[in-house]
Image: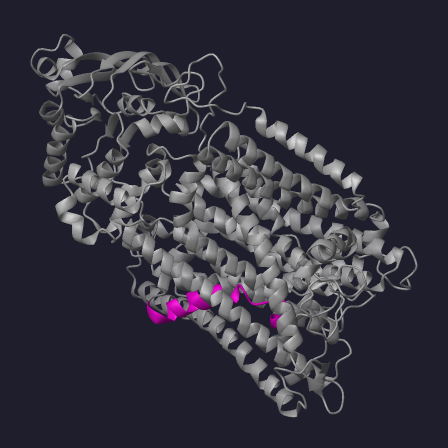
Amino acid sequence: MSHALQDQRPQASRSAAPTSLTRGGLPRWAPAGIAVLSIALGSGIGLAFGLQSEIQWGLIAALLFLAITYTASAVIENRRQAKDRIATSVVWVSFVLAVIPLLSLIWTTVSRGVEVLTGDFLTHSMNGVTSFDEGGGVYHALLGTIEQIALATLIAAPIGLLTAVYLVEYGKGSLAKAVTFFVDVMTGIPSIVAGLFILTTWNLMLGFGPSGFAGAMALSILMMPVVVRSTEEMLKLVPNELREAALALGVPKWRVILKVVLPTAIGGISTGLMLAVARIAGETAPIMLLVFGSQLINGNPFEGAQSSLPLYIWEQYKVGSDASYDRAWAAALVLIAFVMILNLVARGIARWKAPKTGR
Amino acid sequence: MAKRIDVSGLSAFYGTHKAIDDISMTVEPRSVTAFIGPSGCGKSTFLRTLNRMHEVTPGGRVEGKVMLDDENLYGAGVDPVAVRRTVGMVFQRPNPFPTMSIFDNVAAGLRLNGNFKKSELGDIVERSLQGANLWNEVKDRLNKPGSGLSGGQQQRLCIARAIAVEPQVLLMDEPCSALDPISTLAIEDLIGELKERFTIVIVTHNMQQAARVSDRTAFFNLAAVGQPGKLIEIDDTDRIFSNPSVQATEDYISGRFG
Amino acid sequence: MASTTPTQIDTAPPVAKSGRSTGRAGDKIFAGLSKGSGILLLVIMASIAAFLTYRATIALSENEGNFLTTFDWNASANPPVFGIAVLLFGTVVSSVIAMAIAVPIAVGIALFISHYAPRRLAAPIAYVVDLLAAVPSIIYGIWGALFLVPQLNGLNLWLDEYLGWTYVFDKTQVGVARSLFTVGILLAIMILPIVTSVSREVFLQVPRMNEEAALALGATRWEVIRMSVLPFGRSGVISASMLGLGRALGETMAVATVLSPSFLISGHILNPGGGTFAQNIAAKFDEANEFGRDALIASGLVLFLLTLLVNGAARLIIARRKDFSGANA
């Protein structure tokens, strides 16, 4: 996995006479010591100047850490060593800088979410619950999300799979090149643009009202390129000898693909599919334009407005009452759990299936 | 310029696996010493312990002493960066920096180690390329990428890059195994010239090559797969190839195994 | 299907005439289906452009303002007046802030995973970073609005006090930190995982022998990275950044939750206000009449073209890099 260039740093030695190969070195504990010192100084400065946000304390501590490391190394070691140490420090600091907000995001969601997350919350809709009331639930939204992503998967998976098969097994020439390029570009379509597209065609031109199905179509546009990309990667891993062996037996190509190639890659393909599902499960923008949102349970995705988890979070956030914020966080926790479980299962499948396809 | 290497009781590990066991030998300055032996006998691993490159592979660890004249490379306070600056290395596959020009490749080590004036840098680069018998072939295209050269030329570029920083010792890890016979001959000639200035240690799979270029030859062997490699014997090349003192050496040289 | 329906391919040589013709017809159908799917994708892309353009022209023909320079969005009024100047400004500024923060940090994390982290930590960290890419944007949004904004109030005041003379950091309006600057920070956090994981992949592909070349010359770890890793990974990092930029440009919910929108262009990025394409569509959609929707579609078209441009460029860079490294192998 890692290329880590693990040089053991020389330890400081006072006894040995300095020769050409040795040099003065900071002791091993220097980075940790400087880190502790900087955090203490950062907090001290923060307290002394009455800075309110801990973010500022942290930033001050980080800057101090870099400055002290550089100075100490430049004085005791040499400039090249100082540069090396500062690079190491910058890399560590950037890692910590990135981890803190991400941990905070997870922590906030979990700690705020569990407050109202009960069995009732999962099994009730918002029917009859006004914005400022406590109570209510996400049942209708969860149902909507599941129906919408199921429909989206039903549309996107076959198209995505077949396109990948085309690219790997049949595709040559400029058409395949164009498809490859636009699949890549398609992964970058903002979700709201996909929503606008379905709005233009399905709702404005064909005159349909908002429905879960309209949202599912927009989601499927977002999902297709992801499915194509991951399936393509997996099909490329299937060794050519396998195809040739089957073809040499006189089996028609389409049967080779269906019976040999796809089954061999099925683990990786399902992983890719689940990751794609996880990605669209959290999409809000197209749902907002096309599914409209509802407080009630609507089990029919083809008729009338529905809700969905992300949309529910957005609605509750917009209400702005304490009770609705609580509901937003609880729904966020449900959504994050949903997405993470999909991810973990997908990666589990990938790991479980990996040795078989990897050979 | 050149220094003597004195190894005593050296073992190297990959994680818990012992790759070479308890090796002691002396390498004379201004000479060529060749390491031969079957695959997996640890000769390359041993070579990489001589400039502390072994420890950059994950899990790599070394026990024992390597004296460069009177300094232990594994002593306390020794900076591996300084060791590698002093003990240069040429690898099995030519590895010029792909994004750098020929000139920048040769100057790369110098630029790390200090501020040179442009003219000074130019002089050293020219001298190093001449030292590597490459100057006449590349002098008109010093600003072209090094990756545009042929394999043999790339390897000589790597040698020029290594000698530009004036190391004490030059380690070569099967430098010709990826090259055609003509390029191999050019490198072998070059090794003959370089030993006037450097202590050279070369790992080779090719026994004729060892016989042609080296003054001393060390034979490594391993008892069985999974066992650590050992130094069987080291002697003058003539003696190793005519009258070795250990039976296994003779068996290997006469092609009975390996 | 004919009579020979082999259950196991390896025991069924299709000698019978019927078997062979099934093979041919099946091949044609299957090849046609898969080719058709590929073409369908192209058609979808083309129709997105075509239909959005069509509705946009309807909107533009009635627009009483200048689409490019008007600082206003009253598309549902009579006569409609709207322009994208503010949105373009806000989208670009917030994305540029996001890139300026995210790219260096992402390169740092990628290097951390590929070259610095203890090996036992590297794989789990990479895994967690990948998982974080899956966190839905609406969750980043409410976290940004309810947690990050209060936290950043202090930083905003501090920047105003000490860097206010730079004009950019001069906060001339009171109010909480629902500014383009905060949006930029939030977007930076959101695109960190994607930029990190693409960069990390590239850094891991640096041939070991290139790194050893630098090490053997007596390079420190940082010098190895500067001489071997960064030159090799440069184009990869560029394309990773552009993928991140594409996400930042089109992000809707995180911006809609955090920003307090206004139709003003202000260089003071700490002031609350401003807007982005996607945020504006989300905010104005509910109260828009049919014509108002067309106007929003017109702005969506601009966003579409913008992301198309950025993503296309990123892909071309990646493709060129493939050729380059192939020639070098």
Q: Is residue B216 left or right of residue A45?
A: left
The image position of residue C278, as x and y in percent, is: 66, 70
- For the stretch drawn in magenta, the main secondary structure is helix
| Residue B96 visible in rendering | no
Q: Quadrant of the C terminus of chain A?
A: top left
Give above or below for C148 relative to C268. Answer: above
Q: How many marks?
A: 0
Q: Residue extending furthest right? A: A133
User: What is the basis of the colouring in this image?
Assistant: one colour
Image-based side of C275 in relation to A187, left or right = right
Q: Nearer the viewer, residue A45 or B150?
A: A45
Q: Is residue A310 inside the magenta stretch? A: no
Residue B229: % across, % down: 29, 17
Q: Position of residue C320 (x, y in %)?
A: 36, 60
Indicate whether residue A188 is drawn in magenta: yes
Within the image, what quadrant is residue B132 found in?
top left
Choose between C131 and A158: the one closer to the eye: C131
What residue sits 65% from the left and 48% below the top? A340
Q: Is residue B27 left or right of residue C139?
A: left
Q: Is residue C245 above or below residue A115?
A: below
**Image x and y of residue C43, in percent:** 49, 76
Please say if C321 is above or below B237.
below
Q: Quadrant of residue A70?
A: top right
Query: Vertical placement of A148 versus B59: above or below?
Result: below
Q: Which residues are magenta?
A: A173-195
Q: Looking at this view, is A324 or B22 the one in front?
A: B22
The extreme top residue here reads B245
Q: Nearer the viewer, residue A289 or A168?
A: A289
